[in-house]
Amino acid sequence: RYQAVIFDLDGVLCHTDHYHYLAWKKVANELNVYFDEKINNRLRGISRMESLEIVLELYPKQLSEVEKNHYAQMKNDYYLELLQSMSPETVTEDVTNTLNEIKNKDTIMAIGSSSKNAKFILKRIGLIDYFAAISDGNNIIHSKPHPEVFLKASEYIGVKPNNCLVVEDASAGIEAAISAKMDCAAIGDGKSNLSATYKLNCLSELLEILY
Ligand code: B16
Ligand code: MG
């Protein structure tokens, strides 16, 4: 039934979600606002500027657009620094084995990520060649939970939404998949979202759903 799998990136194929946390934590410290893992979970899957708005919820003053851009830039600069430690060796066996199995079965694979750094990360960790198309933060206007990023991915690969399965770690992403009329397998933090079609304890459980 599923002709294609659309993977989210952060929190699914790699653990850049922790780097996002550290980078936002640095910005929060700079602004002297409280920030923890629970707040960070709300940032999963949403865009950089929308994430900043959530970080600023506990900030007493109103920032100008220039100041907001400054903090968003600061976050991304630090995030990019943290990404320097990523390499093909940081990819888990669970991820590599699963992608190889899916490739062998000729199921199409694509990326549906809100990140503007998606291609850079995929190149760094050596996974870019697995994907027939990459839909990311650079080709969308609305970020998750809007379905645009997944609808664009399905358009790029020429597979109808109904025949695509999304893998997500974020509630915003699960909702985006459902609005795109795609089934969704939730992993990690996403498992607590009741709307997901399937729940995965590890990525290779995807193979049981697909074949
Ligand atoms: P960037 P995903 C998302 O990636 C992250 O989960 C989210 O925390 C981040 O704010 C967003 O990308 C934008 O990332 O600042 O690199 O453009 O989970 O959709 O792959
Ligand atoms: Mg994610």
Image (cartoon, rainbow, N blue to C red):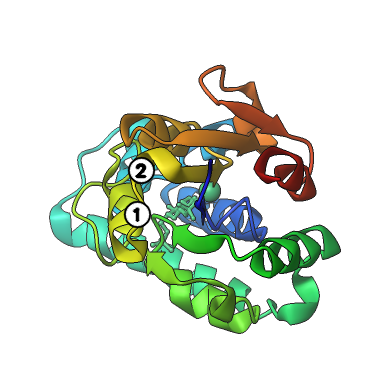
The amino acid at mark 1 is Ser
Nearest the camera: 68 or 104?
A: 104
| 3 relative to 198, above or below | below
Q: Residue at x 56, y 56 (%)?
A: 10
Among the 4 quarters of the image, the one containing residue 145: top left
Among the 4 quarters of the image, the one containing residue 209: top right
Judged from the image, the quadrant occupied by ligand 1 is: bottom left
- Residue under circle 2? 161
The amino acid at mark 2 is Pro
Furthest residue to the left? 65
Q: Secondary structure at mark 1?
A: helix
Asked whether the residues under the numbered discs 2 and 1 touch, taking CB atoms below 8 Å apart as contact, a structural biologist would say yes
Furthest residue to the top? 194
- Residue under circle 1? 154
Q: Residue at x 67, y 61 (%)?
A: 102
> Considering the image in quadrants, where does the C terminus appear?
top right
Residue 66: horizontal and vertical position, in percent? 17, 61
